[in-house]
């Protein structure tokens, strides 16, 4: 006896609501009907406003189911674990939330305190509460901290996507989905902008207590060391507390006004925004005027545009990282068991916004601070200070 059409459509709605999204061919297999039949049902449910269609995927338009007391039902949650004081990741979280809520899923946000190994108990608690998947941005202030998490992260039995984290090549997490900004390209944008303005001696000041900081330090060393127009460069910590491990030379811990005079540098690249704004204030107190005496590029572009002068800045595509990470997670949640889809390692390109803190070497004082976009739009290539 054939199942009544309305009952079948109610089953489709229930299945999609339980997962947030589902593939048409998977629904056809579960209901033991043809793909054509499910497509016809989905078209009608979409016309009625009860479903939304994508390319081969169906998404719910209904709010996530709630249990008595307002709790979100198991199966409707995705856990997101980020570090404490994660201002850099705020835009990333917003991007992820938009995608997940449109798919009928809710975010259960977990904030990891500043202690080693803080993420693991939070993930275990989220899984015990019924989280279907995970978006993760472990603190990883050092390589040792990163490697300490490899074992338990590799053993997760639910889909997980790393945000702004790229595991070491050949490690246990090399095959874990991840979505990152291409920080090498961001460093390249900063150097090329300054070199194009005639700067030949550059100081790079970064933090050294996050994966992004360590990636930027390596990128600046590689790019500046190989650039035919960079005569000399130096690296320093952007703040006394910005180093997580290791011993540093006198130059690397020197006050930046002193280091600028010692190296004859005419430009600074500073990571991240808050440190950059404070350094510009310190330079002014030492009689170093930005950009007349020294051009400055900030890296992060969260609050760089609010400075005096507004800072030229490299902006990683923070919201896009969250959106794409959530999309990758949704694909994992929707795929059939054993589908064997290839691991995604997605990189998105930062952009450069030119403001009033950079100018050509030897140029006359500008009449006003600019705010033009001299950047390269981000694209796909396939906090806490970051």
Image: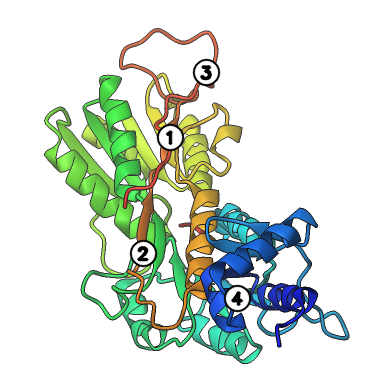
Under tag 4, what secondary structure?
strand
Q: Nearer the viewer, residue 309 or 61?
A: 61
Residue designated by label 4? 79
Disc number lying in front (3 or 2):
2
The residue to which callout 1 is attached is: 377
Residue at position x 23%, y 31% in the image: 201
Q: Tag 1, which secondary structure? A: loop
162 vs 237, nearest the viewer: 162
From mark 4 to mark 2, how far is it between C-alphas?
19 Å
Front one among 164 and 298: 164
Q: Which mark is residue 344?
A: 2
Q: Earlier in the sequence, mark 3 or mark 2?
A: 2
Q: Write down the residue under mark 3.
A: 370
**Disc 1 crowd, CA 10 A, few/some/many (<14, 14-19, 20+):** some
Give how far apart the Cα atoms at labels 4 and 1 are.
30 Å
User: Residue shown at 37%/78% (left/top)?
Assistant: 145
In which quarter of the view is residue 132 placed?
A: bottom right
């Amino acid at each position: 006896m054939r199942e009544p059409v309305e009952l079948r459509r109610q089953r489709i709605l229930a299945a999609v609501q339980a997962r947030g999204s589902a593939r048409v061919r998977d629904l056809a297999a579960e209901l033991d009907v043809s793909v054509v039949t499910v497509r016809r049902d989905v078209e009608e449910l979409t016309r009625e406003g009860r479903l939304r269609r994508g390319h081969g995927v169906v998404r719910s338009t209904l709010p996530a189911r709630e249990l008595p007391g307002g709790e979100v039902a198991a199966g409707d949650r995705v856990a997101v674990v980020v570090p404490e004081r994660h201002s850099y990741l705020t835009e990333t979280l917003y991007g992820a939330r938009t995608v997940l809520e449109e798919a009928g899923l809710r975010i259960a946000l977990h904030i990891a305190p500043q202690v080693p190994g803080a993420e693991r108990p939070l993930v275990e608690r989220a899984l015990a509460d019924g989280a279907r998947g995970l978006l993760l941005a472990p603190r990883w202030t050092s390589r040792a901290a990163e490697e300490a998490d490899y074992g338990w992260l590799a053993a997760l039995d639910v889909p997980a996507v790393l945000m702004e984290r790229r595991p070491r090549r050949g490690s246990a997490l090399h095959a874990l989905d991840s979505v990152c900004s291409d920080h090498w390209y961001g460093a390249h944008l900063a150097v090329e902008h300054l070199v194009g303005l005639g700067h030949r001696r550059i100081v790079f000041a970064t933090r050294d207590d996050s994966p992004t900081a360590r990636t930027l330090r390596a990128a600046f060393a590689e790019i500046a060391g190989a650039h035919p127009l960079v005569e000399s460069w130096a690296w320093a910590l952007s703040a006394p507390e910005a180093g997580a491990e290791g011993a540093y030379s006198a130059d690397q811990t020197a006050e930046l006004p002193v280091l600028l005079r010692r190296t004859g540098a005419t430009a600074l690249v500073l990571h991240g925004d808050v440190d950059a704004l404070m350094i510009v204030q310190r330079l002014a107190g030492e009689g170093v005027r930005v950009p007349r005496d020294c051009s400055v590029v900030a890296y992060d572009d969260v609050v760089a545009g609010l400075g005096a002068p507004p800072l030229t800045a490299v902006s990683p595509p923070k919201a896009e990282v969250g959106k794409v990470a959530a999309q990758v997670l949704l694909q994992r949640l929707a795929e059939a068991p054993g589908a064997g889809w290839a691991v995604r390692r997605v990189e998105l390109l930062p952009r450069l916004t030119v403001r009033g803190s950079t100018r050509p070497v030897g140029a006359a004082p500008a009449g006003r601070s600019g705010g033009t976009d001299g950047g390269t739009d981000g694209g796909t290539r396939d906090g806490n200070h970051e």
